[in-house]
């Protein structure tokens, strides 16, 4: 345990430079970090990359049959064809869908400020001893908590972290024979290592139907191309200009992918493009941001806030809390928060 704990303050780049001299292998580690954390190894906590490396290169990817939406269905407790899940609803709770939150209700002030419930956009009020926010730290304290002085812990978080870019996402249905025999599910395309972090330079490609045909109609394959981009690059346009830009960007991405899958453009049966504006709308995150990134070299995971906040009874989960970004990390933050609250309620 002491040896494991020592990694909390380390970044992946620190250990990579210490033990690896080969430039190509160092670039490989950089792209392995960048493809999920959106920063290079020097700014990626060692604790997180350990989990990701094990998933991607040792144990193998755990992919939910039917798509990632099945995870949410299982947590809710819906009957799935391959299993019966006893989730939230089976335990007597309910889930409200397509509901917007107006604010988190509080009482008291200063050090005695306490969360006592939430108010929805339609005016409905729900009271409770605990409020758990899955919004980012920025959104929680800037838009949801009633006007109060920003807690010192949140001021510190804003000094240490800034917002990630968003993404361009292109979802396509393509004729199956355009993919060569033995094609792999996941691809990362980097043509210039010096421009790896620039918008549209790194392409991340997924063809999930190669592993699970149920996510696509019988016959074609589903292809997802996504690449980082900033919301500022999509502002100040008319609807016609916006739609034209989406088309032009998607065409350019597909053309680059044709170096590996010739004829992909002509084999496209369906295509839908999402911009940072799309991510902002459906994810309800500022500028459609992927999450927080360090604004300076972090001390591994030691700078990330935990679930507790300065407001009594208010907890935060997600990528702006320990242990940070990535599916594994976000799941861990939610699990840890739920477990600690369940234990305190016993």
Image (cartoon, rainbow, N blue to C red):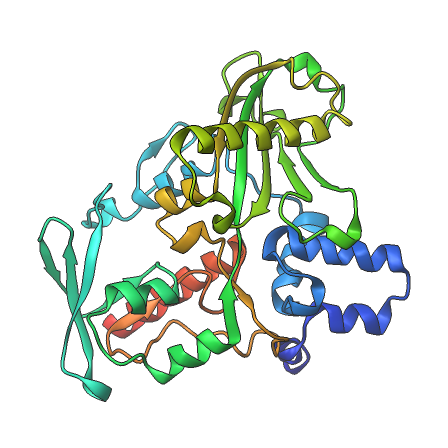
- For this view, does 262 lie left or right of residue 322? right
* Position of residue 73 measured from the top left corner of the image (x, y, whole percent): 35, 39
For the point 19% across and 61% down, the residue is: 103
Residue 346 appears in the picture as rendered = no
For the point 82% across and 70% down, the residue is: 17
Asked if residue 130 is positioned above or below residue 61 in the image, the reply reads below
Task: Determine which quarter of the picture holds residue 135.
Answer: bottom left
* Position of residue 230 measured from the top left corner of the image (x, y, whole percent): 53, 50
- Quarter holding the C terminus is bottom left
Task: Determine which quarter of the picture holds residue 53.
Answer: bottom right
* Position of residue 229 measured from the top left corner of the image (x, y, whole percent): 56, 47
Residue 92 appears in the picture as rendered = yes
- For this view, does 63 lie left or right of residue 241? right
- Quarter holding the N terminus is bottom right
Asked if residue 194 is positioned above or below residue 210 in the image, the reply reads below
Q: From this viewpoint, which residue is outermost toward the bottom?
A: 111
Q: From this viewpoint, which residue is outermost toward the right?
A: 22
Q: Which of 337 and 109 is in front in this view?
A: 109
Q: Nearer the viewer, residue 100 or 239?
A: 239
* Position of residue 8 measured from the top left corner of the image (x, y, whole percent): 61, 76
For the point 43% across and 30% down, the residue is: 82
């Amino acid at each position: 345990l002491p040896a494991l704990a020592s990694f909390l303050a380390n970044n992946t780049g620190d250990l990579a430079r210490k033990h690896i001299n080969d430039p190509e292998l160092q670039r490989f580690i950089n792209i392995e970090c960048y493809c999920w954390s959106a920063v290079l190894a020097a700014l990626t906590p060692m604790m997180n990359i350990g989990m990701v490396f094990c998933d991607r290169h040792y144990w193998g990817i755990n992919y939910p049959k039917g798509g990632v939406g099945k995870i949410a269905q299982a947590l809710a407790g819906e009957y799935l064809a391959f299993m019966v899940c006893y989730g939230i609803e089976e335990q007597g709770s309910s889930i409200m869908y397509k509901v917007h939150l107006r604010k988190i209700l509080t009482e008291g002030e200063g050090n005695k400020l306490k969360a006592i419930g939430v108010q929805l956009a339609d005016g409905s009020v729900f009271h409770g001893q605990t409020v758990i926010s899955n919004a980012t730290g920025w959104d929680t304290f800037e838009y949801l908590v009633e006007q109060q002085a920003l807690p010192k812990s949140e001021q510190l978080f804003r000094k240490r972290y800034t917002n990630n870019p968003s993404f361009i996402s292109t979802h396509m249905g393509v004729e199956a024979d355009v993919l060569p025999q033995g094609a792999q599910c996941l691809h990362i395309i980097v043509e210039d290592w010096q421009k790896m972090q620039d918008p549209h330079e790194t392409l991340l490609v997924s063809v999930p139907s190669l592993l699970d045909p149920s996510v696509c109609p019988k016959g074609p394959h589903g292809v997802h191309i996504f690449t980082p981009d900033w919301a500022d690059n999509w502002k100040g346009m008319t609807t016609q200009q916006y739609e034209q830009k989406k088309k032009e960007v998607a065409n350019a991405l597909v053309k680059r992918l044709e170096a590996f899958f010739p004829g992909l453009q002509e084999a496209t049966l369906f295509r839908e493009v999402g911009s940072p504006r799309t991510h902002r709308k459906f994810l309800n995150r500022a500028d459609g941001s992927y999450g927080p990134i360090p604004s300076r070299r972090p001390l591994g995971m030691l700078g990330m806030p935990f679930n507790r906040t300065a407001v009594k009874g208010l907890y935060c989960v997600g990528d702006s809390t320990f242990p940070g970004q990535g599916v594994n990390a976000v799941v861990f933050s939610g699990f840890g928060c739920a477990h600690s609250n369940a234990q305190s309620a016993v």
